[in-house]
Amino acid sequence: MELRQLEHFVLLADELHFTRAAGRLHIVQSALSASIRALESDLGTPLFHRSTKQVQLTEAGRALLPEARRTLRAAAVARETVAAVQGLTTGRLVVGFMQASYSYDLPDLLRRFHTAHPKVHLRLRQAPSAELVEGVRTARLDLAFVAIGDRPPGGVAVRILSAGPMPLACPPGHRFAAAGPVPLAEVAGEPFVDFGPGWGARTATDDLFRAAGLERLTAFEVNDIPLFTDLVGQGLGIGFVPPGVAAERARLEYVTVDPAPTWRVAVAHPPRELLSAAARAMLDLIR
């Protein structure tokens, strides 16, 4: 088994398409097929179901995938550790971030990192927090800026960057707008516009209602902040938002709720011993 074969396997598992995977690897499709067959022969079992229409992982392939990612990450860390002795000059860093990154100045961090390490290639991936955490856990991401709930996610290390109460967004003229802090029990009776499962705002809201023993009606579920504010602005529901959303989208009413969900922004990363040199350098820049 060779690292090159594991790299080919992981890319094919991501694409589930020989032509696209070969294109990403800059090799011909026949070479990729030969590499996968050699790996399967070495392991003594098929890793993919192949048909004329699709490619799918076998059970053995699904079991191998996370281990292959970890092996490739460990190999990259080993290479970069040796290179770091002479200074971090090259490398690749894959950083995940959520749509609502208002609570941390990611562009400033990227600017400072690029100034210090201009030859490190940065790749950015945007996704909901749960998907980003899974990306770090399975070695698809080197680190990620996420929102987390009351319970820290398992399988990754996290560093809390900020925490604070989430305001409740209401349409202009809503009856809550003129009130003081609104009891959560009263809020529960209103229709909600919620973000989708896996979003940090949704996790924090769900955690709060679960802890209070309350239920709410989700009238609309969205995966986009502008659409959220549009629906709330049309009077179709209310919903909790990250604090930075309130600062940028002033046309809605923002209300204090007692108690309110907590917006916790964190950076998620592998254990220190599995960090690449580039990831360690970025973490050292985080204030």
Image: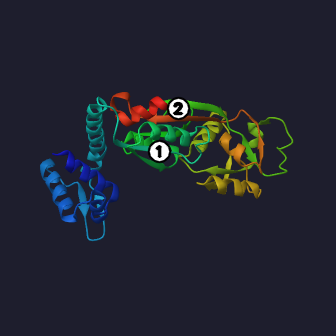
Residue 36: assigned label? none
Q: Residues within 10 Å of mark 2 (few under 14, many from 20)?
A: few
**Residue furthest to the bottom:** 52
Q: Tag 1: residue type?
A: Gly
269 relative to 41, above or below: above
On screen, residue 4 versus residue 10, left or right, reads left
**Residue furthest to the right:** 178
x, y percent for residue 15: 34, 59
Mark 2 against mark 1, which lies toward the viewer? 1
270 relative to 233, above or below: above
Q: Tag 2: residue type?
A: Arg
On screen, residue 247 versus residue 161, left or right, reads right
**Secondary structure state at the residue bearing disc 1:** strand
Residue at coordinates 29% horizontally, 29% vertically from top-left? 85
Q: Which of 140 and 121 is in front in this view?
A: 121
Q: What distance separates the C-alpha of mark 2 from that of mark 1?
A: 20 Å
Residue at coordinates 28% horizontally, 65% vertically from top-left? 19
x, y percent for residue 215: 67, 43
- According to the image, label 2 marks what residue? 151
Q: Residues within 10 Å of mark 1 (few under 14, many from 20)?
A: many
x, y percent for residue 269: 43, 35
On screen, residue 34 versus residue 15, left or right, reads left
- According to the image, label 1 marks what residue? 96
x, y percent for residue 183: 77, 36
